[in-house]
Image: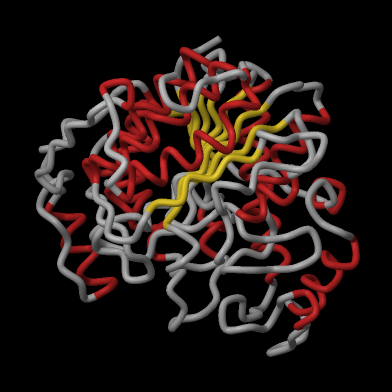
Amino acid sequence: MTHRGRVVWDDTLTRYDFGPQHPMAPIRLELTMRLAHDLGVLEHLDMAPVPDVDDSKLLLGHSQAYIDAVRRCGVVSQSADLAHGLGTPDVPTFSDMHDASSRIASATVEAARSVWSQEVNHAFSPAGGLHHAMHDAASGFCVYNDLTIAINWLLSQGVERIAYVDVDVHHGDGVETAFWDDPRVLTISQHESPISLFPGTGWPDDIGGPHAEGYAVNIAIPAETGDEPWLRALQSVVPHLLAAFEPQVLVTQHGCDSHFRDPLANLNLSIDGQRTAYEWLHHWSHELANGHWVATGGGGYAIVDVVPRAWTLLMAELSGTPLDPHTEVPEAWRSYAHQRTGLVAPLTMTDDRTPVVASWEAGYDPDDPVDRAILATRKAVFPHWGLDPLTQ
């Protein structure tokens, strides 16, 4: 097996485009891939095009009636199917919507295939991470749930245990719902509290169905939380459960809308805090999941300041050749980003923060709101795995 990572990408993925006023602008992907190229990151990665996909793959995550509705709404201009969540402000319809959406699903399945076939250890689908789409409905900017489809594809290939870790600022509700009662899949979502953010779900006591109690894990982080406590929460829950579950594959969703500059959420992470999470997940994939790591993009709406830097750093980490965070952003890229968006790009790949994270084992503060959130999750889930929520 080669230890090079792989990125599944071609320019057709930018056709997933809800229009010029929609926050999920495809330019964020174009700028990401251009920055990764300009910094030499892609030289350390295999590049794979997106295979064609047919309904048989999409049916791993969605009903035929829903797929037909997506196809129909992408043919008839300005059509809507509100029963299937299509034609809303969050998910407006657009021409060839079915093809554009299905290619994202195909890219993530190809990333999963690349890892499970042992062609590479790690693979990244930057356009993927559409974690809100449900079996029969679009939601939250997401048409087809590429993650659910890819996880079900892995299960169909004989994988017995898959761990899914979602660090998007929004709850990974679509993936959790798909595997709510399936003990082959452990879903962990660390997100801003449902009190203050869409989709209003993902409470600590939401732990899975009757055949899979403890297999749905939700870490609901209070608004305004910054790097150190956010990372403390991730460290205090995720590696313990991965060690207990012993996954054969780790699938991760890397929405970077937890950043303090993101316009649609209320957490205060820096690029440096996000980069630390990438490092940890990479390490955990090797230590706890046989090195099998399938990563995707996700949310992120600061299209120049954050998304390109975050996912370029993720690709560098995934390749095994991480970037020095003080690397300068190339002037040619900054000029191009300004030309395309009118926005001024950052000068370096860091926000000049150095998170220092205290471990849970060193003690916790019952008066701290993040520690209370961590403890609520640990109390709800850890006993199902034979773990002590206070000490382990």
Q: How is the image coloured?
A: secondary structure
Estimate the x, y position of residue 242 in percent, counting from the top left.
54, 22
- Relative to the observer, which residue lies in front, 166 or 12? 166
Q: Is residue 18 visible?
A: yes
The residue at the far right in this view is 64
**Left or right: 179 as drawn, with respect to 355:** right
The residue at the far front in this view is 366
- Relative to the observer, which residue lies in front, 113 or 256? 256
Q: At 48% from the left edge and 27% from the top edge, which residue is drawn?
A: 389
Q: Is residue 312 visible?
A: no
- Relative to the observer, which residue lies in front, 128 or 77? 128
**Left or right: 240 as drawn, with respect to 333:** right
Count of number-bearing discs: 0
Q: At 86% from the left edge and 69% from the top edge, which residue is drawn?
A: 68
**Left or right: 12 as drawn, with respect to 304:** right
When asked about the image quadrant of residue 224, the answer is: bottom left
The residue at the far top in this view is 1
Q: Is residue 59 above or below residue 99?
A: above
Estimate the x, y position of residue 11 in percent, counting from the top left.
51, 55
When asked about the image quadrant of residue 281, the answer is: top left
Q: Quadrant of the C terminus?
A: top left
Estimate the x, y position of residue 122 in percent, counting from the top left.
51, 25
Q: At 63% from the left edge and 48% from the top edge, which residue is drawn?
A: 206
Q: At 77% from the left edge and 36% from the top edge, which residue is drawn?
A: 153
Estimate the x, y position of residue 275 in percent, counting from the top left.
28, 37
Q: Quadrant of the N terminus?
A: top right
**Left or right: 220 as drawn, with respect to 180:** left
